[in-house]
Image (cartoon, rainbow, N blue to C red):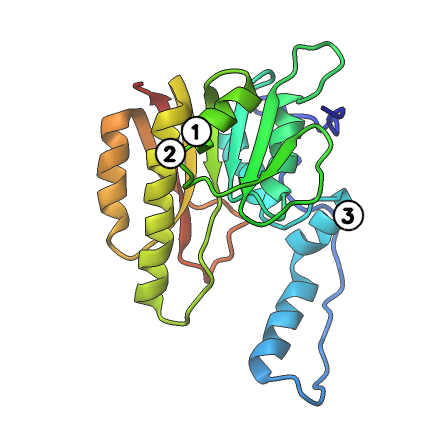
């Protein structure tokens, strides 16, 4: 594996590196032929999103990296030396954060191991192993444990199905992904391990929470600051896998 990127974990109670730094002038997007009002609004939001700018500055592949940074600042599950699986990892922002936090590929040999898996091929990430594979495949759990060198300490899932525009359909689709990720996590996690997955508010997430409470010592339902205020997304964090 290649050497990790060397990101630093903030000390408990100390300053965090999970928020944007500095202030930027507001960018206004002019109307253009062929651009719809909705696309104009999306572009303006992207150009003025401090997390988008900060991700570009730090070399993260997506603004979503800051969601994981903030979740880990709060719950501290990405410990140096940990084995981590990132499900649906493309484009790789969460995998990059995991590499930094567990010190994957550290020269001392005591660093962690990070494997990102996605049905879509991912550009190589220093310090991680990324594979193009469907985690629904029957052999996926065994393949991942072999790549990790043992059972996982952490299973991550920031997966989301393509939006349909129907809130109820979108909710059901993302919850189906989260439930499948939970089923997968039970096959690869070691006792005491952690599971993190994206969900959408809408009612059926309660079913998943009840399932998680049976399998984990503690389950939290949180919305990191980097999640947009108008988004229904939240994250479930299960710690202390019962095995």
- Residue 135 position in % (x across, y down): 45, 39
> On the image, numbered disc 1 is attached to which residue?
141
At a point 73% along the width and 26% down the height, the residue shown is 4
User: How far apart are labels 1 and 2 at the CA level?
Assistant: 7 Å
| The quarter of the displayed image where residue 5 is located | top right
Who is closer to the viewer here, 118 or 5? 118
Q: Which mark is residue 184?
A: 2
Disc on the earlier residue, 1 or 2 = 1
Query: Closer to the camera: disc 1 or disc 3?
Result: 1
Left or right: residue 228 compared with residue 181: right
| Viewer-proximal residue among 116 and 221 | 116
CA separation, marks 1 and 3? Answer: 35 Å
**Spot occupied by residue 94 in the image (x, y as percentages of width and height):** 59, 40
The quarter of the picture where residue 83 lies is top right
Provide the secondary structure element on which disc 2 rests. helix
- When the figure is inspected, residue 89 is found, relative to residue 227, above or below; the finding is above
**Callout 1 touching callout 2 (CB < 8 Å):** yes
């Amino acid at each position: 594996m290649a050497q990790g990127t060397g990101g630093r974990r903030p000390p408990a109670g100390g300053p965090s590196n999970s928020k944007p730094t500095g202030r930027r002038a507001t960018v206004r997007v002019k109307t253009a032929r062929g651009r719809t009002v909705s696309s104009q609004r999306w572009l303006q939001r992207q150009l003025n999103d401090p997390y988008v700018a900060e991700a570009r500055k730090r070399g993260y592949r997506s603004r979503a990296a800051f969601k994981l940074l903030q979740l880990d600042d709060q719950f501290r599950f990405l410990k140096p030396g940990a084995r981590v699986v990132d499900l649906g990892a493309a484009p790789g922002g969460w995998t990059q954060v995991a590499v930094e936090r567990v010190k994957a590929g550290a020269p001392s040999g005591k660093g962690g191991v990070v494997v990102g898996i996605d049905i879509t091929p991912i550009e190589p990430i220093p310090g991680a192993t990324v594979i193009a594979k469907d985690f629904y495949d029957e052999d996926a759990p065994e393949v991942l444990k072999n790549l990790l060198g043992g059972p996982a300490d952490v299973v991550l899932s920031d997966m989301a199905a393509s939006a349909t525009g129907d809130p109820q359909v979108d909710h059901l689709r993302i919850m189906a992904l989260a439930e499948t990720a939970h089923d997968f996590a039970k096959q690869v996690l070691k006792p005491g391990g952690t599971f993190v997955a994206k969900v959408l508010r809408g009612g059926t997430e309660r079913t998943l929470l009840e399932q998680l409470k049976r399998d984990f010592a503690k389950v939290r339902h949180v919305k990191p600051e980097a999640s947009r205020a108008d988004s229904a997304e939240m994250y479930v964090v299960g710690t202390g896998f019962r095995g």
